[in-house]
Amino acid sequence: MASTPGEHGAAFPPFDASTYASQLIWLALTFGALYFIVSKFALPRLANIVEGRAERIEGDLAEARRLRAESKAAGEAYEKAQADARARANAIAAEARDAVAKQAEENRKTLDAELAAKLEAAEAQIAATKQAALGNVRGIATEAAAAIVERLTGAAPAPAEIEQAVDASLAR
């Protein structure tokens, strides 16, 4: 039963039993050619691409590991340097504190010595002034006693008697 184009009564060609053999041959030839092309050209290229990517990924991972180790070492070095800097700063601060305390102690001792010298000088001056005042008091007391006795008695007393009486009064 041959059908002409445009007729609808014929079977669909792939389902036509008379063409199975030729369809299977063409399927085998096409599959073989496709398999040959894919295995000789496409798969090696894909394998090279996958292998290149795997190598690149492995290299990137190795680089990342190396950089991580370097950054870890740099971080540890930074922390050590920071700890050393803190220790040096504390040492410098302690030295400065000790130097300031020593200087303050020296200044205090110097000031104490100066004040002690000024105090001695002032005490000596006070003692000298006191002696001078006491000397003047004796003279004033002698003159006042002589004036009082003369005024009360009308006669001037002997200077030796007045000095003796003033000395006895001052001795008490």
Image (cartoon, rainbow, N blue to C red):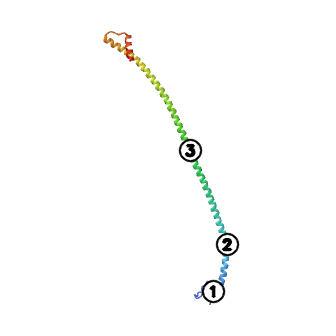
Quadrant containing the N terminus is bottom right
Identified by mark 2, the residue type is: Ser
Callout 1: helix, strand or loop? helix
Q: Crowdedness of circle 3 by 10 Å Cα count: few (<14), some, many (20+)?
A: few
Q: Nearer the viewer, mark 3 or mark 1?
A: 3
Callout 2: helix, strand or loop? helix
How far is mark 3 from mark 2, CA to CA? 69 Å
Indicate the position of residue 59 as horizontal and vertical percent values.
64, 60
Identified by mark 3, the residue type is: Ala
Q: Which mark is residue 17?
A: 1
Determine the residue positioned at 64% across, 64% down: 54
Tell me which corner region of the image, top left, top right, bottom left or bottom right, holds residue 6: bottom right
Q: Nearer the viewer, residue 70 or 145?
A: 145
Q: Is residue 146 above or below residue 116?
A: above
Report the residue marked by disc 3.
Answer: 87
Q: Nearer the viewer, residue 56 or 118?
A: 118
Q: Mark 1 and 2 residues: CB-CB less than 8 Å, in contact? A: no
Indicate the position of residue 93 as horizontal and vertical percent values.
54, 41
Report the residue marked by disc 2.
Answer: 39
Quadrant containing the C terminus is top left
